[in-house]
Amino acid sequence: MGTGDKIRNKAQEGAGKAKEMAGRATGDKDLEAEGRADKSKGRTKEAGEKVKDAAGKVKDAAGKAKDAFKS
């Protein structure tokens, strides 16, 4: 996962948490729900990046195994 992507995802998650807390503190249910949604989006994006990283590692391992059998 790229460092920039990780920072953006964490920033979105943090902003969502702040909105959620502000909504809870002021009794604004819409802001609270918007904050939960933003927090979830950040977490989902981070999970997607981790899946891409894992897929890349599997691809690399498969390539190495294929090269080992060629020898």
Image (cartoon, grey):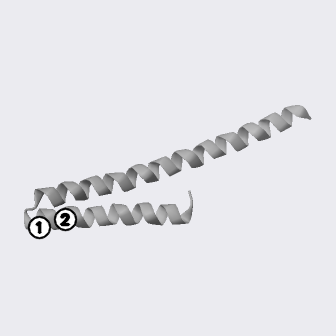
Does 61 sit left or right of 10 as displayed? right
The type of residue carrying mark 1 is Ala
Residue at 19% x, 65% y: name it. Answer: 21
Q: Give whichever of 12, 69 is nearer the camera.
A: 12
- Nearer the observer, 70 or 28: 28
Amino acid type for the residue under numbered disc 2: Met
What x and y, as percent, mark residue 31? 17, 60
Q: Choose top left, top right, bottom left or bottom right for residue 26.
A: bottom left
Within-10-Å neighbours for mark 2: few <14, some 14–19, many 20+: some
Kindly indicate the quadrant of the structure image that contains residue 29. Answer: bottom left
Q: For the view shown, which residue lies furthest in the top direction?
A: 69
Q: Residue at x 89, y 33 (%)?
A: 70
Badge 1 marks a residue whose secondary structure is helix
Residue 61 placement, left or right of 44: right
Identify the residue shown where x is 31% and y is 57%: 39
Residue drawn at 38 percent across, 53 percent down: 43
Q: Are the residues tagged 1 and 2 within 8 Å (C-beta)? A: yes
For the N terminus, which image quadrant?
bottom right
Q: Label 2 belongs to which residue?
A: 21
Vertically, is 18 above or below 44?
below
Res. 42 mark = none
Please, which residue is most extreme toward the right here? 71
Screen quadrant of the C terminus: top right
| Coordinates of residue 17 in the picture (x, y in percent) | 27, 63
Question: Distance of mark 1 from mark 2, alpha carbons?
Answer: 6 Å
Where residue 56 sits: x, y (%)?
64, 45
Q: Is residue 66 above or below residue 10?
A: above
Most foreground residue, 13 or 31: 31
For mark 1, what is the residue? 25
Percent across and percent down for residue 33 are 19, 54
Task: Classify mark 2: helix, strand or loop.
Answer: helix
